[in-house]
Image: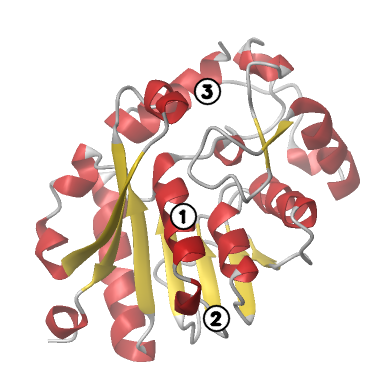
Amino acid sequence: MFKALSALRLFHLNSLKLTDRRSYFSTECLDDESITKFISENTEIVVDHNLTPEIKLRLFTPNCRFWFERPEFWPFEDPYWAIYWPGGQALSRYLLDNPGVTLGKSVLDLGCGCGASAIAAKLCGANIVVANDIDPVATLATCMNFKLNGLESPVCVTDDMIDSDPGNFDLILLGDMFYDEALSYNLHTWLKHCIKTHKSQVLIGDPGRGQFEELAFQSRLKKLAQFELPKPVREENYGLNCSSVWCYDLELTLK
């Protein structure tokens, strides 16, 4: 199996640091068209074995070269966007099951990865969708996935939006973002600011990683839904069985 993928899974599940490695070229050497072509040739369109068969995504599978290839041959930053993480699956499933949550809303998908949650929001009638990821390859992959689903590309932002004022979004989505303690507390502080300043609603998707379950601000969160993960997803994520969607308790957060 592609060693970088194994490292990625361990990174999210166990908060391990990825080993530094050199690439033979970087995104700075390529234009968007070349990167898009590379993504198209080295991913597979997936529509099943996850919580949202309604959504088509370009992902890594065992049929792809880089599932097995030596990681130093991968030309970009580590491809978080090429895996449909279980927190994002639960979040996307929740949005599809509850279209009123996004209907007519302005939505920010923070750390969008493959863009599934942003796609779900748009499919359910969101007025404006902004897909944010600090990896520009992820935003290109997100645009490709929007097109796969018959949607116009979202607004894409590659700036680190944490600690900045993102503007007045009705809804902020975060899937699988609470995998590191320091990042988690930075996110919490920033999200509280967004809630207090703009009255934004926040939805979080997480499969129960220790780094999320042990957070001190868990008492401010309410679980909205829990989904049993399909067998292939459980196997790829080292036995995680379920994934949940959480929101902030506004009464507690606004105190």
Instruction: Name the mark nearer the viewer: 2 or 3.
Output: 2
User: 10 Å neighbourhood of mark 2: few (<14), some, or many (≥20)?
Assistant: some
Question: First in sequence: mark 2 or mark 3?
Answer: 3
Question: First in sequence: mark 1 or mark 3?
Answer: 3
Based on the displayed image, in which of its 4 quarters is residue 199 positioned?
bottom left
Based on the displayed image, in which of its 4 quarters is residue 120 positioned?
bottom right
Question: First in sequence: mark 2 or mark 1?
Answer: 1
Q: Secondary structure at mark 1?
A: helix
In the rendering, which numbered label is found on residue 103? 2
Based on the displayed image, in which of its 4 quarters is residue 225 positioned?
bottom left
C-alpha gap between disc 1 and disc 3: 24 Å
Q: Secondary structure at mark 2?
A: loop
Left/right of residue 43 with respect to residue 93 in the rendered view: right
User: 10 Å neighbourhood of mark 1: few (<14), some, or many (≥20)?
Assistant: many
Type of amino acid under label 1: Arg
Is residue 43 visible in the rendered structure shown here? yes
Residue 233 in the image: state x and y as whole percent.
Answer: 44, 30
In the picture of the structure, the residue carrying the numbered disc 1 is 93
Type of amino acid under label 2: Leu
| Residue drawn at x 24%, y 58% as measured from the top left | 185
Between 2 and 29, the one lying in front of the other is 2
Left/right of residue 58 with respect to residue 217 in the rendered view: right
User: 10 Å neighbourhood of mark 3: few (<14), some, or many (≥20)?
Assistant: many
